[in-house]
Each structure stands twice: as structure tokens, then as C-alpha cells.
Amino acid sequence: MTAAALPADLAVPDYGRSTLADVLPGVATALGVPVRRGDLPADPLGLTAALAGARRVAVLLVDGLGADLVRQHADIAPTLAALAAPVGDLSAPCPSTTPVSLTTLGTGLPPGSHGVLGFVTIVPGSAGATGEERSLNHTQWADDPDPRTWQSQRTVFEQAADAGVAVTTVAPYAYRGSGLSDAAYRGADYAGTVSAGDLAAGLVQALGAGPRALAYGYTPELDLTGHVRGVDSPAWRAQLALVDRLVEQVVGALPDDAALVVTADHGMLDVPEYTRLDLDEEPELLDGVRLLAGEPRARYVHAVPGAAEDVLQRWREALGPRAWVVSRDEAFASGVFGPVDDALAGRVGDVVALARGSWALTATRREPGPSRLAAYHGSLTGVELAIPLLTAHGRALH
């Protein structure tokens, strides 16, 4: 299959060179862990040198902290703006959405290798007596399907723990024991948090868990605020200031031999009403469709048997320049997911539609909540893909 060329405003993540997948393998390598990630190099970002001999490293992922947004609001986030950026921006994976990104971070692998391939994906082979296959929302995932089967790759956390590193995830109590936490953070002790202050204190405490320590922290509120209020809102800017204060507290309390790495899972952009296409009001686009998955800026369309080519052509003609619309095979050949394991291919739709510009493919009747959001992400525009990699060091490492 010849790869379908992406439009100039979309980009293929450069897996194995400068993406979110490369962060934890580099950190673990800097801590002396022999990381294995298939054919990809262990430390393509050069974090062994950038972390300057640190024996304890905290990695903080701020959900929704796009690199462009950090630069635009340096006055609101002076601590973030002052941190070192040793390799420039990184890229989120495809789709640029939280479950995909968190699993990409935790495994050190592209989505096509770990299998968490979208916010909502079909569960192939799940058709029961009704004959209808079900979908999986990865943010509402408990234990069905089994996380260790659905995402069977060993995480970087497991590899670090096996090498004698004390490994801790510091994240909200509500996510403890979830399918996504198991898929992405397997191998780390889970320390539940109740607030931003608790996260800051918990990260610093986890750095003291052993002579070599890897502490991973996650904070979701900036992303949630952006979705509900928009990234061009007083609420979002106020939340960014709180994130900056959180980072300041961690930096100020770093042990002398420790380092902090700050990154994100994706950027995001506001979507006005005039660039929303409601799929529930476009019956010709749903003709021949057995299941609509993904999310408003990264749609997976599963066709009824024999209808895939017709569905592809209708979506291409109807969406035109509003989205990059390709077949599953064309999407795989483009490399946006990295190499895709054959056993995982059916989780992606027969048709893939990645939004361009500020367009969103909403579905107001079947997805009323998500269709009302102010800001989105998921596609491959620069503002969605560009994420920061920022570092700070304890006093002994300067």
C-alpha cells in the first residue's frame, strides 16, 4: 500500500527520535536501566547527558500543556518559562489524545505497538447475541477487556523496577486501579493524590524511595479546564498559573541529586461553532457505518461488511479540506501510528478522518457531552502535537 500523503498542515510523529515515547526510555537509561524497546534507540533525546548524573528523577506530565501554549503565556507561567529545554519541542503520538499519550509514555512505544490507539476504539470480536460490537472508552475502562491482554507490552516502569529502581506513580486516587493506569503505569507503586499540593509533596517524597528513584506525576486539571472553558479563557489562564506554582514547589524541594522533567500529552485548540460538523445531522455520512469511534478531531469509522470503499469516498467528498480522510491501510502506510502490529489493526476504523484547521466532527445526539466542549485535540496539527520537554536540577547537579 502506497502511503497517502498528509496535507502540509499535518505531521507524522517522529517516533524513536523526538516524541513522547522517547521520554521515559531516556530517563530510565540515565538511571542505569537497560531499556528494551524493539528497534528504537534507548535514549534518542540524550537525556543521559541532559540529566547530568541524577540518581533520582521526577517526570511530571501536565495534561493539555501544549508547547505553543507555554510560549504564549510565559508571563503567567514564569517558572515553566525559565526551565531548560534541552532538545526543543517533542511530538505527541497519533491520535494526540490522553489515553494514547499516557500509554505511549509508559511503554516507550508508538501506538501501533502498544495498542491503545484512540480515545474510543472498537473491541474487535466483541459482538454478542445482538451481533453488535462494543466500543471501549479508555478513560472509563475498568477490567474488561483485561488491561494486560489489551496492552501486553512491558512498560518502562516494569523494566526500571526490575533493574532495582524505586518506581512510583503519583496521580489522582480516582484513577488508581483503572484499566488505563494498569496499561500505562504497570510496574510502579501507585500513590494516590487528592490535590495539587498533595501531588507536589508526593513527587518529592517518592524521590526518596531508594538510592535510585523514578517518580512519575500526572495532573489533569489544565486539560479539563481547557475542554470546558476554552484555552483562550480566564479560567484556563488561572489554572496555568496554578500549574506553574506546582512546578515551582517541586523545583524548590528537589533533593540535591535529583532532576525534574516536565512534559505533556498534547496541546489543544478552541473550536468555534462555525467549524463544527455535526455527523448526526449528516445521514449520508453514516450510511453504511456500523460503529463510529474516536473523538471529534480523530474519527474512526467502521463500515458494514462490503461498504468500506463507499464510506471512504463519501467521507472524502463531504469533508474535503476539513479533514485528512484515508483508509485504514493508507493510515498505517503513512506511519502516523508507527509500525502497527497485525493483531491490533482492527482497533482502527476502516476509514480514518483527522481534522484540519479548527474543524471538529461532533455527534450531538450520540455524544452530547463531548460535542459541547469548547476546545479539542486529537489530530496532527502543530498546536496539538507540539509538547514541551523541560528540565530542572538539584543543587549538586548544576
Image: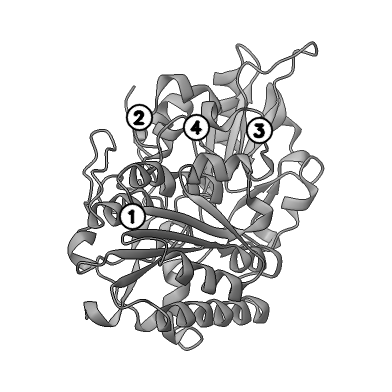
Residue under numbered circle 3? 143
- Seen from the viewer's position, the closer of residues 233 and 281 is 233
Q: CA distance from mark 2 to mark 3?
A: 32 Å
Pointer 1 or 3: first along the chain: 1
The answer to whether marks 3 and 4 mark residues whose Cβ atoms lie closer than 8 Å is no
Q: Secondary structure at mark 2?
A: helix
Horizontal side of 296 relative to 164 (left or right) equals right
Residue under numbered circle 4? 151
Pointer 2 or 3: first along the chain: 3
The answer to whether marks 1 and 3 mark residues whose Cβ atoms lie closer than 8 Å is no
Residue 50 is situated, as x and y percent measured from the top left of the image, at 21, 67
Crowding around mark 1 (Cα neighbors within 10 Å: few <14, some 14 to 19, many 20+) is many
Pointer 4 or 1: first along the chain: 1
Q: Secondary structure at mark 1?
A: helix
Residue under numbered circle 1? 23
**Residue type indicated by callout 4:** Gln
Residue ID at (53%, 26%): 149
Q: Secondary structure at mark 3?
A: loop
Pointer 4 or 2: first along the chain: 4
Residue ID at (64%, 43%): 178
